[in-house]
Amino acid sequence: MNRLAIKDQPGRYRLVELDQIFYVEAEGDDSVVRTARAMLYRHVEPLEEVEPRLPSPPFFRIHRSYIVNLNRVLEIRLRGERDYEVNMDPPVNKVLPVSRDRYPELAELLGI
C-alpha cells in the first residue's frame, strides 16, 4: 500500500500518500506527520510503532525524534565539528538534526 493510515482520534483514520510525507516527528507519546500542507497530522501512536509501517528506504530514522523521507531531503550539511543536519525540500524548509550514530548509514544510503 502506498499510504500511511494515521489514527488521529479513536475510530478515525486518515490515509496519507507516502510520497506526500516529508517527515514524522515524535511528540510525547504521539507522532506528528508533516506533509507539504500547512496542516500537521497528529497520530496517536509513538514513533516506534509508526517506523515499521514506513518502507525503508525512502524513509529513514535520522534521530530518536525524526523519520525523514529521503526523497524530500534538499541538503545535508555539517553543523559544528561532527554534527550534521538535513534541510527538507520546500515548502517545508525545516532543518532537522541527524544523530551522530545514524549519520554513517544515512551517508551510505545517499551515496555520500
Image (cartoon, rainbow, N blue to C red):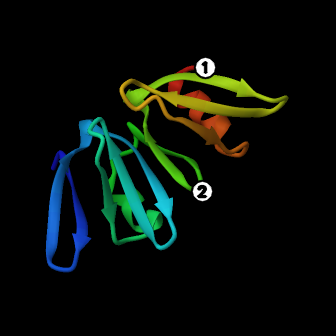
Q: Position of residue 78 (x, y in %)?
A: 72, 25
What's under tag 1, amino acid-wise?
Answer: Ile
* Quadrant holding the C terminus: top right
Q: Is residue 53 above or below residue 103?
A: below
Q: Quadrant of residue 38?
A: top left
* Label annotation for residue 47: none
11 to the left or right of 83: left
Q: In the image as oriented, which residue stretches furthest toward the bottom? A: 10
Disc 2 from disc 1: Cα separation: 22 Å
The residue at 68%/45% (across/down) is 99
Nearer to us: label 2 or label 1: 2
Q: Nearer the viewer, residue 72 or 103?
A: 72
Q: Secondary structure at mark 1?
A: loop
60 to the left or right of 18: right
The residue at 38%/24% (across/down) is 90
Q: Tell whether label 1 touches label 2 (CB within 8 Å).
A: no
Residue ID for mark 2: 64
Q: Residues within 10 Å of mark 2 (few under 14, many from 20)?
A: some
Q: Position of residue 47 (x, y in %)?
A: 45, 63
Residue ID for mark 1: 112
Q: Quadrant of residue 71?
A: top left
What's under tag 2, amino acid-wise?
Answer: Arg
The residue at 35%/52% (across/down) is 33
